[in-house]
Image: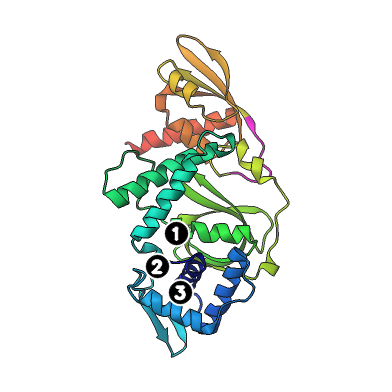
Amino acid sequence: MATNKSALIRYKTIDQCLKNTYRKWTLEDLIKKVSDALYEFEGITTGVSKRTIQADLQFMRSDKLGYNAPIVVEERKYYTYADANYSITQSPIKEEDVEKMKEIVSLLKQFNGFQFFDEMTELIAKLENNIYKSARKTPNYIQFEDNKQLKGIEYLNGLYQAILHQKPLLIAYKSFRANESKKEIYHPYLLKEYRNRWFLICCNAEQEHLVTLALDRMEAFYELDAKLYKPYQGVDFETYYSECIGVTRSEKDRPQKVILKFNSKNAPYVLTKPLHHSQQIVLHNETELIIRIDVIPNFELEREILGFGENVEVLGPKLLKNVIERRITKSLKNLG
């Protein structure tokens, strides 16, 4: 059966609530959360009735929408999923929805080639490929970089909405060095992707400097009152990461002149795929290529350089050259 936009917003909002096991959800809580969502996305000010939410819960439990959601009531008043890992977003797409998506992709393709749509080209191709692969059981005709084991992608939309609507977050985060997750309040400002991995740029409520949280290290997050949100005025995020490769930097870091020398074998690769938008040719002849990039030295730059192995030499700055030498020496020791 076809489902209207308001109903989809209600189902998705209920799903987001029930997935959040850090809070117990009464029927009144769900009504308030859904009413807030309808106001944010549709401008509906009349809220939603108790009967409507009760009907939505029954629909989500049934197979009429293809969900069969395992919604249970605990202590006779708290709604939750019997399976903590369940989400309606894991359900298969219905045929009528596939047809609607085909129409949307067809419309988007008409705008291809317009300057303001340049960044959509890859997205349109990926959407079309996935839709036809699902609907017609066709093989992949275009393959994008992907990692099926990558965690945290399911948080992407919720974090985006929190940034969009300026809401602080209580995040349960487990760093690589920690044995257990730690719950702290953060003010989110930016989502950034690097090498098929997503990061949240934010401020800890107890501190003022920016921190970078990897989505694959998050275990859960919960939206807090927007009145507590603290906008960040320290940097311009439109240009903040243009001065580095990757996501590792601080507000105090400044770009340095990095000079790299490549042999003739790797010169074409570096010329056709610049390491950074600031890349300039210092020298190019039959035997070598010397380039300059103005970037902040960080872990990602080191990894980029080390990836070229014996085909690259760091000419400057001296501190970066020493760091690369130490890492290569340590690597050789590890080989025995």
Q: Is residue 250 magenta?
A: yes
Check if mark 1's residue and mark 3's residue have beta carbons within 8 Å: no
Q: Residue at horizontal 35%, vertical 51%?
A: 148
Quarter occupied by residue 255: top right
Q: Residue at horizontal 58%, vertical 69%?
A: 38
Q: Residue at horizontal 36%, vertical 44%?
A: 129
Instruction: Calculate the distance from the C-alpha at mark 1 to the C-alpha at mark 3.
Output: 15 Å
Quarter occupied by residue 36: bottom right
Q: Is tag 1's residue or tag 3's residue first in the polypeptide sequence?
A: 3
Residue type, numbered disc 2: Ser
- As rendered, which of 129 and 206 lies closer to the eye? 129
Q: Is tag 2's residue or tag 3's residue first in the polypeptide sequence?
A: 3
Q: Is residue 270 magenta?
A: no
Q: Residue at horizontal 42%, vertical 52%?
A: 101
The residue carrying mark 1 is: 154
- As rendered, which of 188 and 132 lies closer to the eye? 132
Please provide the residue range marked out in magenta: 249-256
Instruction: Calculate the distance from the C-alpha at mark 2 to the C-alpha at mark 3.
Output: 9 Å
x then y, percent, for residue 293: 59, 27
Residue type, numbered disc 3: Leu
The residue carrying mark 3 is: 18
Quarter occupied by residue 294: top right
x then y, percent, for residue 290: 53, 18
Residue type, numbered disc 1: Glu
Q: Is tag 2's residue or tag 1's residue first in the polypeptide sequence?
A: 2
- Label 2 CA crowd tier, 10 Å (few <14, some 14–19, many 20+): some
